Each structure stands twice: as structure tokens, then as C-alpha cells.
Image (cartoon, coloured by chain):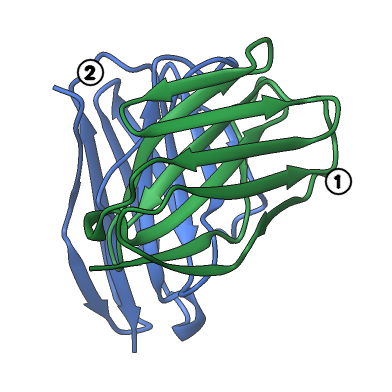
Amino acid sequence: KQEVTQIPAALSVPEGENLVLNCSFTDSAIYNLQWFRQDPGKGLTSLLLIQSSQREQTSGRLNASLDKSSGRSTLYIAASQPGDSATYLCAVMENQGGKLIFGQGTELSVKP
Amino acid sequence: DTEVTQTPKHLVMGMTNKKSLKCEQHMGHRAMYWYKQKAKKPPELMFVYSYEKLSINESVPSRFSPECPNSSLLNLHLHALQPEDSALYLCASSRGQVNYNEQFFGPGTRLTVL
């Protein structure tokens, strides 16, 4: 059974720091991995989608990498800003059914 | 337009009520999803519709009844719910159900069952 783990569970950093969020999964037979951001009480905003054949994706200050063989993904946020404060969720899709399996999330707080 | 809309934003209902949640997208997506999210927990898949047909039911109790009247619209009919069903209900859509497709989520409906 696929399990997705995110470390750390919470992170507090001063504004301007570069930071890395980690995601690991137990079964490497995934089709893709998606990173989301969720603000309190809100829906999910898709940040990046990495296909299983890809190694990384970039969008603005965000860079996500994928190492399928080791079951790991990282989300790199450059020059963090207070507006980046949110919970970041990674999710893997392991079959063609479209079911996403989520990690527990990393709650990020960026202090001005 | 990359938006998934959900109504209502908030819903309070008693255990004997019947209510419905609505989700709409106009991106031409052919797969739509219902997820349930309890406080401080990640979303969990409930149902998947592909080309207006139910393709996945994650063993959800029958008091939750999904419906997909057309390719843009997804409903979730609620009847005889329990207080433990209180949660944020999220709708999502993607181009298709197959792999590679990015899922886009709506803002959710916050449901409270009294």
C-alpha cells in the first residue's frame, strides 16, 4: 500500500531564506507527483506536476525534483516571502484511475 | 479559465436533512473528483467520474450519492449524514482520468452536520 510522508511537519523561517520541503513515497511505481499549496480553510492550488519520466519542473521561484528510484521528491522555494506561508502537500498518482495519495503536509510560516 | 467553482461555500445541516453540493468547471475537462478533507488531515478521494460515468467509488457510505449530469457539472447529494461527516468537501477536475493529467481543485464546501 502506497504511503506518502512529508518532512518536516512544520517549518518557520525568516523572509528571504531558501528552503527545501521533502516528500517520500514507499512504492516507486508512480505515474506522476503533484505539489499543492493550501491556505487555511481554502482549496488546493496546484504548484507543479512532475511526470514519472521527468526529473524536475520549475515555476518561478519554485523547483520540484523527482527521484523515482529512491522514492523522493523535493520542493525548493527560493527567496521565501511571507505570502508563501501555507501548508504544502505532495501527492502521488500510482495508477491510471486518477487517485491521488497525499502526504500529511508541511506547514510553512515565513516571518517578515 | 482555469477555475473550478463550488457552491455553497458553507453548509450546516441536521442529520435528517437532504442537501446537495455543486461543482462546476468550464475547462473542457472530462474527469471530475470528490475529495473529503478533515481538519489537519490531507484530502481523501471519494469518487471519480470519467466522461460522465462513475469510475471509482472508494467504498463511500450510501448516504453520499454523486451525480454527473454533464461534462461540466458534478453534484454530491447528501442524506442522513452523521456529525463525523463534517469536513471540507473538495471537487477537482482534470483533462482526463488517465495518468499525466494535472488535477485542479475548487475552493471547497465547508459542511457542518449537527
Count neighbours of disc 1 (C-alpha within 10 A) and say few if under 14, some if 14 to 19, many if 20 or more: few
Above or below, comparing residue B11 to residue A105 in the picture: below
Query: In the drawing, what numbered circle is on residue A36?
Result: none
Q: Which chain is green?
A: A
Query: What amino acid is found at the position of numbered circle 1 in the picture?
Result: Lys
Going by the numbered disc 2, the residue's amino acid type is Met
- Whether residue A12 appears in this view of the structure is yes
Q: Is residue A76 above or below residue B62?
A: above
- Give x and y (percent) for residue A21: 56, 50
Horizontal and vertical percent for residue B38? 48, 70
Residue nearest the observer in this picture, B46 or B52:
B46
Q: Is residue B39 left or right of residue B93?
A: right
On screen, residue B96 above or below B69: above
Quadrant of the image occupied by residue B44: bottom right
Which chain identifier belongs to the blue chain?
B
Question: Does dot 1 land on a helix, a strand or a loop?
Answer: loop
Q: Which residue position holds label 1?
A: A1
Q: Residue at x 68, y 17 (%)?
A: A52
At label 2, counting other C-alpha atoms closer than 10 Å, the crowd grade (few under 14, some 14-19, many 20 or more) is: some
Chain letter, disc 1 residue: A
| In the image: residue A93, left or right of residue A57 | right
Q: For the C terminus of chain A, which image quadrant?
A: bottom left
Q: Gap in Å between the C-alphas at discs 2 and 1?
A: 33 Å
Along the viewing direction, whichever of A14 and B28 lies nearer the viewer: A14
Which residue is rendered at x = 57% and y = 20% of the image?
A56
Q: Output the chain of dot 2.
A: B
| Disc 2: which residue | B27
